[in-house]
Structures are given as C-alpha cells and as structure tokens.
Amino acid sequence: MSLGEGGITILVQRMLAALLLLAGAGLVAMTEKSLAVHLTAAARHGGQALDLGTDGRIEPGQYGHMVRAVGQPEVIEAPYDPDFNQHAKTPVLVRHVEMFQWREVRLGEQVHYELDWVDRPVDSSRFAQPGGHENPGTFPIEGKQFDAGLVRLNGLALAPALLHALPGSESVTPETGNMPANMAATFTAYDGHLVTSAKPGRPRLGDIRVSWEAVPLQTLTVFARVDGDRLVPAADASDGKGFEVQVGDRRLDDVLPDVPSEPALLWVRRVIAVLLGALGVFLLLRGRSREVPLAAALGVLAISVVAGACWIGADGMYAMSWLLLAALAAGIVAWRVRVRASRD
C-alpha cells in the first residue's frame, strides 16, 4: 500500500522533527560534557579562573575565586638584610655566604685536593687524606633569604608561597657605604662580592665571601586564589600546589595545559539546543500555532533532561539546576495538556 502525498508529507515532517530533536539533544549533551570535563580538570588546580588581565580588579562576590593576573609586581616594602644594612627593590633578596675551603676531588682511583669557594662547611675529617687539608669548620655568618614585606600584583598582595615561586635571579651589588662599622672593618668589596681576604684576588683558607641575588621585576602571569586582599595558593587543590607563576603574559591554557578550554558561546549553544528541541516538538504537533507554548515547554523538558543526565555523578548542583528546569517545564506541559483537553 503506497503512501499518498499527505502521508509522505507527514512522514518527512516527523523525520525532520526527530532530526531536530536529536540535534538539540546532541548539542546540549556535547556542550555539558565539555563543560564538565573543563570544570573537573580546573578543580584539580583550585577551580575556574576569572581573568583579571593586566588591569582588572576584584569585584564584590568574586572573593575566593581563582584568578589569572598579569603584570609586573609592585614592591611596596622592600626586603632588608639587617646584618649588612642592605636593601633592594625586589620581591626576594638572597644572601649567599661562601668560605674558601679544601675540597676533595676524586677521579677514578685518584684523589686530589684543591682550595675553592664552597657555600657550606666541608668536613675535612672525612677526607681520605685529612692531614694538611683541615678546614675551619662552621661559618661565622650564614646565608639567608629575605622576603619583601609587601608585594602587590593587580592590587592584590602576593602570599609568601607565591613570592618564593617567582622565577629568575640577578646579582645585586652591595652598597658598602651603608654597612655597619664592624662589617665595614671586616669586609672589602671585590668583583661584586664582599670578602674578608687581605688580598681579595688571592684568598686564603678560611676567608669568607658574601654576595646577594634578587628576583628581578618582570612581567608575570600568576594563577592563584583571592583571599581578602591577597593572592594565595588554593589549599584544596588536588594537584598539591594550587597556583602557577610564569614569566610573561601567558594565556590560561598555557599556564594550565591539562585543562581543556571552556566551551565557547556556552549560553548561545544552550539556547540553540532548546530552540531545536522546541522546533522538533512543534513539527511533531503538526505545526499548529496554538501549540507553540506546549511545543516550547516540551522542548525545554527534553533538552533539560538530557543536560541534567550529563551532570549526574559529575556535579550535583548543575544536575539539580537542569532537572529543576525540567520539572518546571513538565508542570507547564501538564497545564497546557489540561487546557487543551478542556478546550477540545
């Protein structure tokens, strides 16, 4: 039995309706699954990041969020080495102390000894030939790190963990005119260092050499959590770190390469999915204008159920939001069906 022209039209209409419904469901499923993967990956590092860029500022309601901030840190309270009265406009100042000591060098079965600058006491009693190679022992002054009292980026203070992660180093020439009298009488400036050597170019066993290095001020990209007026590591990040610091203006997907990008045009895709679903239902209802509200509600119901199912087991809040929308649409559908029945 062949289909008449009207039957073919209805068949084509139903097939088109099914395709539209499948397209809407597929689009929303792909969108929500991609968003779920993005959020799950971002959660390993503390969560999604707001992009402050170079001049963005935190708004009310954004505290506690992860952010991407870019710029050159501003040192408000510079670090200070009180022993030598040294300052530097840097986030972190490091004092290195070395002693001219004997060290043992082994080349296969051969052992020989040489004098060199070493940044820790070398225990000469452990040498194969300690006689004539005795080292003085403990240092009279130790190396030390000095943090700036306050460093800001985008108006937010950097926590100590972030300061210590700032990359790079550069030598700092000591200011001998600022040194305390006892240090000035003990040390002499030589080749960017302070040395106790009577003849700086010819150091002797036990001489001390002091130098400083600083973290340079440069453009950085920082990914961290906002805590009040500070940027801090995310303590709940499962990656065990909760922050990233990189040189230059880096995009978020460069800073966190294991986090897929959030789906583009998220809400546009969701709206299109609902419209496709609603249009599919409308065609199933044979395109009657009076069925537009029912078709819209059924479209929202179908797409919401699919979207909610994508979040089950991934994020309860997203799942609940979509399923609540589905329940609301179901209520509208029930109301329209009753209106339709009473009218018929």
Image (tube, grey):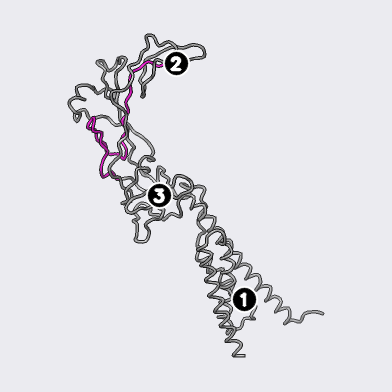
Answer with mark 3 or mark 2, whichever residue precedes in sequence: 2
Assign a secondary structure to mark 3.
strand
The x and y percentages for residue 37 are 54, 55
Residue at 42% x, 46% y is 243
In the figure, 325 relative to 157: above or below? below
Distance of label 3 from label 1 (alpha carbons): 46 Å
Task: Give the residue pinned by disc 2.
Answer: 105
- N-term-proximal mark, 2 vs 1: 2
**Other-residue count near label 3 (Cα within 10 Å), few / some / many at <14 / 14–19 / ≥20:** many
Total label count?
3
Which residue matches tag 1?
Answer: 281
Q: Nearer the viewer, residue 127 or 276?
A: 127
> Which residue is outermost to the right?
1
Alpha carbons under labels 2 and 1: distance apart? 84 Å
Please say whether residue 43 is one of the residues in the magenta stretch. no
* Residue drawn at the location 39% of the way across and 15% of the way down: 124
In the image: residue 49, left or right of residue 327: left
**CB atoms at circles 3 and 1 under 8 Å apart?**
no
Q: Disc 1 residue type?
A: Val
Q: Circle 3 is placed at which residue position?
A: 224
Decide which of 287, 229 is in the foreground and name it: 229
Q: Would residue 197 appear left or right of 27 to someone viewing this image? A: left
- Majority secondary structure of the magenta segment? strand
Q: Where is 108 relative to 90, above or below?
A: above
Name the element at disc 2: strand
In this picture, which residue range is highlighted in magenta? 74-103
Q: Position of residue 102 (x, y in %)?
A: 37, 15
Q: Are marks 3 and 2 in contact (CB under 8 Å)?
A: no
Residue 154 drawn above or below residue 312: above
- Disc 2 marks a residue whose amino acid type is Val
